[in-house]
């Protein structure tokens, strides 16, 4: 699925099944919650913390998709074309970081 299509599908789902978008600030709070859930799972899976019973059975991809879903909602609400934004972000990173990481001794 292309990013543009994802934005359209989320918008259609919100307007039919979800009734309407939550406010931008509410969705920002939800985004922070979802990032926290992703962080919790990552820390347990790849970090030193052990799993709690409530963490077991959680899927990393599903948690990432929850973050992406809410980010797409915010993009739709604020008129951001994520395809265009990502392309511009690549340009920015290529200009700014084109050689920087190659010269970083910590990455060698």
Image (cartoon, rainbow, N blue to C red):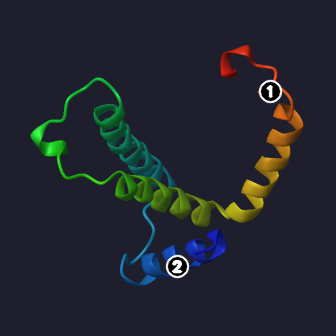
Q: Quadrant of the C terminus?
A: top right
| 72 with respect to 41 (left or right) | right
The residue tagged 1 is 102
Is residue 31 positioned above or below 84 on the image? above
Crowd rating for badge 1 (residues with CA inside 10 Å; few <14, some 14–19, many 20+): few
Residue drawn 80% across the image and 27% down it = 102
Q: Is residue 78 visible?
A: yes
Is residue 62 positioned above or below 90 on the image? below
Q: Quadrant of the N terminus?
A: bottom right
Q: Are marks 2 and 1 in contact (CB under 8 Å)?
A: no
Question: Of helix, strand and loop, which one carries label 2?
Answer: helix
Is residue 42 positioned above or below 83 on the image? above
Rendered location of residue 78, percent (x, y):
63, 60
Judged from this view, the residue extending furthest toward the bottom is: 16
Question: Of helix, strand and loop, which one carries label 1?
Answer: loop
Front-lying residue, 23 or 107: 107
Distance, label 2 to label 1, CA atoms, is 39 Å
Rendered location of residue 48, percent (x, y):
29, 23
Q: Which mark is residue 92?
A: none
Residue drawn 58% across the image and 64% down it = 77
Judged from this view, the residue extending furthest toward the left is: 53
Lower sequence index among marks 2 and 1: 2
| 22 with respect to 96 (left or right) | left
The residue tagged 2 is 9
Judged from this view, the residue extending furthest toward the right is: 95
Rendered location of residue 12, percent (x, y):
50, 82
Front-lying residue, 104 or 73: 104
Rendered location of residue 65, percent (x, y):
43, 59
Residue drawn 47% across the image and 62% down it = 69
């Amino acid at each position: 699925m292309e990013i543009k299509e994802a934005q359209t599908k989320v918008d259609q789902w919100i307007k039919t099944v979800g009734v309407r978008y939550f406010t931008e600030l509410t969705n920002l709070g939800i985004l922070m919650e979802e990032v926290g859930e992703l962080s919790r799972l990552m820390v347990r899976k790849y970090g030193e913390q052990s799993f709690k019973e409530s963490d077991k059975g959680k899927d990393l991809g599903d948690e990432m998709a929850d973050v992406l879903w809410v980010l797409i909602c915010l993009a739709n609400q604020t008129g951001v074309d994520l395809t265009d934004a990502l392309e511009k972000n690549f340009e920015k990173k290529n200009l700014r970081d084109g050689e920087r990481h190659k010269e970083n001794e910590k990455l060698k």
